[in-house]
Image (cartoon, rainbow, N blue to C red):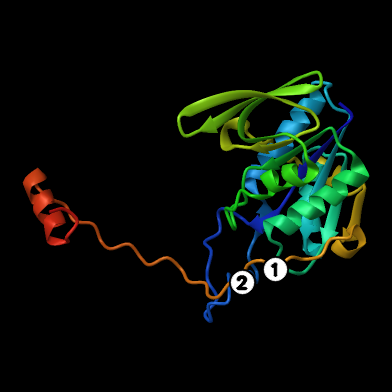
Amino acid sequence: MRKILVGVKRVVDYNVRVRVKPDGTGVALDGVKMSVNPFDEIALEEALRIKERGEAAEIVAVSIGPEDAQQQLRTALAMGADRAILVKTTEAIEPFTAAQAMLAVIKNEKPDLVIVGKQAIDDDCAQTGPMLAALWDRPQATFCSKLELKGSSAVIVREVDAGLETIEIDLPAVISADLRLNEPRYVKLPDIMKAKKKPLDVTDLATLGVAIDKGLTTLHTEAPKPRSKGVIVKDVAELVAALRKKGLVS
């Protein structure tokens, strides 16, 4: 395998408590710590392990977002990616537009495998990978918890509702990484310093010939309602009586 392309999205760090803007127009991002989407870290880690086994020659990390997304791409380079590409845009990108942008990069880079996170923790859409596979007209394997390359094909174990499903797909293909695929490595300071010298190319949607498709309009954003205080009951009879009082059982 010559090249693996990995999607890397900039999101609010999973340790940060997300706050909604007072006017309800979105999530407050000023001064908030941003990180690589955790599922994308898993995708990148899997690509790195494939390369370390001698089954790939180059790993390219790709992100679509603002200029500041270079920080997350530098993290990907510090983890071990060879090159990075930023498709710069200041507008919010929906999955279909992201898939179109990724496809444009694929046409230029011609990778043998594309690995993305199964979903991003900011919108939880889980749509970009499948849409990309459809646009690219290549096989896909979503929710991957185990990956094994076998020449021109890949054997994937998928996490499904009924348990685990094992499939084999031809390459090139799109794979989305699930939580149990691996545990990403810790980035060390020397690797962070080395990453500053690795190539990071910047382009934009217009250069790639991609137009932003606004299929959705956010009308209002609000925080979840606080959970009511719990009640301790003495026995099952009291529990049933409390549930009946709330109209939850008849």
Circles 2 and 1 in contact, beta carbons < 8 Å: yes
The quadrant in which residue 241 appears is bottom left
Q: Circle 2: is it few (<14), some (14-19), or many (20+) Cα within 10 Å?
A: few
Q: Residue at x 61, y 72 (%)?
A: 217
Residue 132 % position (x, y): 74, 46
Furthest toward the bottom, the residue is 23
Q: Residue at x 70, y 66 (%)?
A: 92
Residue type, numbered disc 1: Lys
Amino acid found under the numbered disc labelled 2:
Thr
Tell me residue 238's x, y (percent).
8, 50
**Location of mark 2 (residue):** 217
Q: Is residue 189 visible?
A: no
Residue 100's place in the image compared with 211, above or below, is above
Residue under label 1, please give it: 214
Q: Position of residue 224 (x, y in %)?
A: 42, 65
Q: Secondary structure at mark 2?
A: loop
**Distance between mark 2 and mark 1 Cα atoms:** 7 Å
Dividing the picture into quadrants, the one containing residue 70 is: bottom right
Q: Is residue 60 visible?
A: yes
172 up-or-down from 123: above or below: above
Element type where label 1 sits in the image: loop
